[in-house]
Structures are given as C-alpha cells and as structure tokens.
Image (spheres, coloured by chain):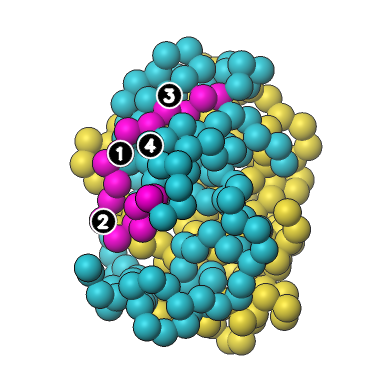
Chain colours: A cyan, B yellow
Amino acid sequence: MRPIGVIHSPFTEKDQTPIQVTRSQALGRVEVFPEFADGLKDIENLSHIHLLYVFHQSSGYVLQIKPFLDDQEHGIFATRYPYRPNPIGLSTVRLVSRQNNMLSIEGVDVLDGTPLLDIKPYVPDFDLRTEGVRAGWYETRSKR
Amino acid sequence: MRPIGVIHSPFTEKDQTPIQVTRSQALGRVEVFPEFADGLKDIENLSHIHLLYVFHQSSGYVLQIKPFLDDQEHGIFATRYPYRPNPIGLSTVRLVSRQNNMLSIEGVDVLDGTPLLDIKPYVPDFDLRTEGVRAGWYETRSKR
C-alpha cells in the first residue's frame, strides 16, 4: 500500500473536520500523482466518487469508543472513527470537475494533506441502499 | 495493514464472482479474528455494513481497462476492477445476524477466503447519494 495522491481540504486541524453529523459541503481537491493520472480516464463522467485514504494523523487503535455525540461505548467497527486496526477512511464526495490529474470535489471531510489510496466510482447499482436501512446508534445519537 | 478477519463466500473461482451488474444476493460470513471481536459491539443494530478487503488474487495493476460489458477502455479509477495500484475492494452488504465474532451477510460478491481489512457502518447521512447521480460508462454499458 502506498499513496497514489493527496487530498487537499480546508481542514488543517483535527478538531476542525466535520464530524459527519450533517454532510459536509466543503470544497477540496484530489491530486493524483502524475504516474497514476492515466487511471482517471472518463472519471469526469461520474457525479460522485468514493475516496479511500489513510487516517495519517491517527496512530494506534481502540476496539471500543464513546463517540462525541453519544454517551455509550460502541465497537470501532460500528463507528467511522479513525482509530481503527487498519486506519483506512472512506468518504463519498461529489466530483465537480477534472483538470488533468487534479479533481475538484465537494463534500470533503478529511484533513488537508491526507494520503489517497484509491478512487472508485459511486455506482447506485452497487452502492445505493434504501430498503430496510437501520443505522444503529447513529439514528439515536443527539443531533447537536 | 494486516487482515482483521476473513470473508467466506460461495465463490471459489474468479469467474464465478458476480460482476456487479445486478446486486448479488449470495449469502456469506465474515469471520473477525478473536483479538478484534470486541470491536463488533453493537454492530448487530446495523442493517448494512461496508466491507474493505484485499483483492488477494489480483497481482499487479493496470491504469486503463476495457470492462467485460463495454467496448472502450476506461481509467481504472472509473471502474471497480481489482487490478488497482492499491488492491483494496469495497462492498456494501446486508448484515443478517451476528454470532460472537462471526457475521452472517447477504449480498457478498467476493472470493472465498478474502482477507478483511475493515468493517464500517453504512450510514445514510454519509453514504447515501440520490440527487444528480451520474454513473458514467456504467449507465450505458450493455446489460447482458
């Protein structure tokens, strides 16, 4: 595993990043290193993409955590917290435009300088789930 | 990066796995290694989970590929093909039940024995995109 690029965002401090209660509308850029730029062919025809990246400012992991907006501990795999055994993050963003190896995105929620591991197309046939969705503790957390 | 578990599925050969044209309804199991089992607390309250895993039977990568159901080359980052610079897969499955460190799932589309890297909750607030979604070449591919 090695970075294929870098995510640029307005967030330079951990406590500034959106806590994913409501969806971020922040603008950012995804810089794909030139050696991988050919892999972007036709990506501009997609409206949304998944970004997989490294939680590079989170070292170590916990197996249970009490989230900021909740008063009970939950297993790390029932949360999106960064302190995971494999510190990989997943965010789905809107692809605004592409200029060569640079993507303009909307809805970024990661720290500036985050190492990018992969980009995947958001495809409703695979990714969209609407029937019978229950989001566990996320549904009952306080919405401050 | 190291496996936190193994995904068990009915698919033992690469050409048996669903090609994600229509959603798989295959049943499978996610075995989380005992040392990480505490991280599953409360996951049973979720209806759907993301699995991040290694495409362990794909070595090397390509930057452009002509998908099985299309007649043009696309950038690897505009496809879900396994031959990626970082061979990480992403599948969203329905969580049927949990028995200790074993999850029963529906909608598996990976090879039996796939190394698991992470489990994340599917949370509509973060993951659901319905407005203005364009899936690029996936929308125009032939649906055989």
Which amino acid does the dot numbered 1 rest on? Ala
**Left or right of residue A71, residue B79 in this image:** right
Task: Identify the chain of the residue marked 2, using the numbered disc in the image.
Answer: A
Q: Which residue is drawn at 28% across and 64% down?
A: A131
**Residue that carries the numbered disc 2 in the rendered image:** A22
Among the 4 quarters of the image, the one containing residue A53: top right
Task: Identify the chain of the residue marked 3, using the numbered disc in the image.
Answer: A
Q: Are marks 3 and 4 on the same chain?
A: yes
**Sequence-first disc among 3 and 1:** 1
Which amino acid does the dot numbered 2 rest on? Thr
Mark linked to residue A10: 4
Q: Which of marks 3 and 1 is in front?
A: 1
Residue B81 x %, y %:
59, 36
Q: Are marks 2 and 1 on the same chain?
A: yes
**Residue that carries the numbered disc 1 in the rendered image:** A26
> Callout 2 environment at 10 Å: few (<14), some (14 to 19), or many (20+)?
few
Mark 1 in CB contact with mark 4 (< 8 angstroms): yes
**Sequence-first disc among 2 and 3:** 2
